[in-house]
Image (spheres, grey):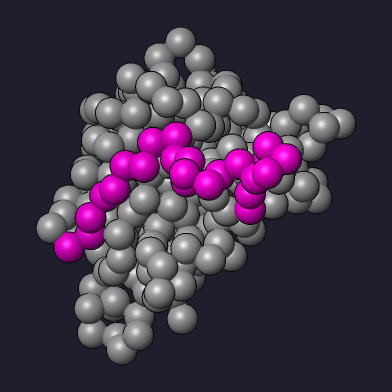
Amino acid sequence: MMKKIKPINLLDTCPLRPEKLAVVDAVKEILTIARVPDTISLYDYGRWRHEQWRGEDDDLVPFLSVDWYVANAWDTTRMQVNAEMLMTLLAEEPWRRKDMLGDHYDILILDEDLYTSRPGWPEDFLVAIAKQKVGTAISTFRLGSCPFTILKTVTMHELAHVFGVPDPDRDDVDTRFGLHCANTCIMRYAARTPDDWESYTWDRFRRGPFCEACVRDLRRYFAEADGAAGA
């Protein structure tokens, strides 16, 4: 069973990304709101490549570089990364075993465009994808001219999904495309990119990132972990 209290590993397809500070800020802020800022560690692996990431034929060795994850989820017809495939690779990576890194959350920032294979999705792209207790992959491809502030909003939104926000049993949720909050909150569904993300970022500045219901969900996720064996 995957744990809730565990490290966060940050990965990136770009060796030097100035706006990565926005991701770090997002992680720190959401953990502070969740009241676990000193409980969960963040490790920045950058554009991670193991010393043996290339094989004898110069092929990418499975699970030994960020490059391999993206390449194996790459759709040559669409020229986009399959978001579900990418999350499956992250969820099933051997690094989660106790004798290796151990269980952890992943945040993967990539320049490549994402798409989803989910039926009925209204767009031919995806800004990000999240899987509860596993992690998130976020594409900067369509974030517009203010990547720092918007990237922080997107990261907080996706991490909150990873941390079980919003609770599906709430009355004020939007289930049209995934599970989102219906309140004035960064957990709303973003139908227009980057316009809605810019709007949610301004809301974050004025009102704070989360509504009261989402803050309760976020804190409950970790509070339940504290007293649950094997949570």
**Magenta stretch: includes residue 43:** yes
Q: Residue at x 80, y 50 (%)?
A: 119
Q: Indicate left or right for 95 with 73 as reference.
A: left
Magenta stretch, main secondary structure class:
loop
Q: Residue at x 25, y 64 (%)?
A: 219
**Magenta stretch: includes residue 195:** no
Q: In the depicted view, which residue is nearer to us: 133 or 103? A: 103
Q: Residue at x 46, y 72 (%)?
A: 97
Q: Is residue 195 above or below residue 22?
A: above
Q: Is residue 6 above or below residue 184?
A: below
Q: Residue furthest left?
A: 38
Which stretch is magenta? 39-62
Residue 108 visible? The answer is no
Q: Indicate left or right for 153 with 124 as reference.
A: left
Q: Residue at x 55, y 26 (%)?
A: 111
Q: Residue furthest top?
A: 145
Q: Is residue 28 above or below residue 39?
A: above
